[in-house]
Image (cartoon, rainbow, N blue to C red):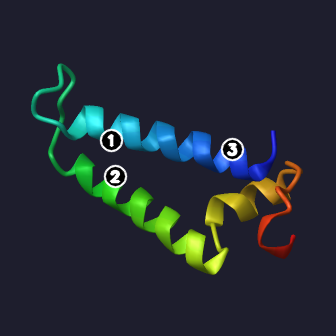
Amino acid sequence: MNTERWVRVVAGLFVLASVVLGAPASPIFVSEWFLAFTLFVGFNLLQSGFTCFCPLDRILLKFGVPGSGACGR
């Protein structure tokens, strides 16, 4: 898997986990403040779409995960 797919997988897992922990109707509800993490992940995905800067992408590249070729890499 390349970095783009890993970013999508990790972002999806983070969003699902934060919604499950932040939604009052969830059986494992902790606090509504977990929904702020969902907002952070969504904002990061949005800005990376415009700027081609994603911190997780950079970290994955340093660990040797093959790049996606997107954004001129």
Mark 3, other Cα within 10 Å: few <14 / some 14–19 / many ≥20: some
Q: Secondary structure at mark 1?
A: helix
Q: Amino acid at mark 1?
A: Ser
Q: Position of residue 24 (x, y in %)?
A: 10, 34
Mark 1–mark 2 contact, CB under 8 Å? Answer: yes
Q: Residue at x 21, y 40 (%)?
A: 22
Q: Nearer the viewer, mark 1 or mark 3?
A: 3
Q: Position of residue 34 (x, y in %)?
A: 26, 47
Q: Which mark is residue 38?
A: 2
Mark 2, other Cα within 10 Å: few <14 / some 14–19 / many ≥20: many
Q: Which mark is residue 39?
A: none
Mark 2–mark 3 contact, CB under 8 Å? Answer: no
**Mark-to-mark CA distance, 1 and 3:** 18 Å
Q: Residue at x 77, y 72 (%)?
A: 71
Query: What residue does disc 1 label?
Result: 18
**Mark-to-mark CA distance, 2 and 3:** 17 Å
**Label 1 or label 3, whichever comes before in sequence order:** 3
Q: Is 60 left, or right, of 55 in this rendering?
A: right
Q: Amino acid at mark 2?
A: Thr
**Label 2 or label 3, whichever comes before in sequence order:** 3
Q: Amino acid at mark 3?
A: Trp
Query: What residue does disc 3 label?
Result: 6
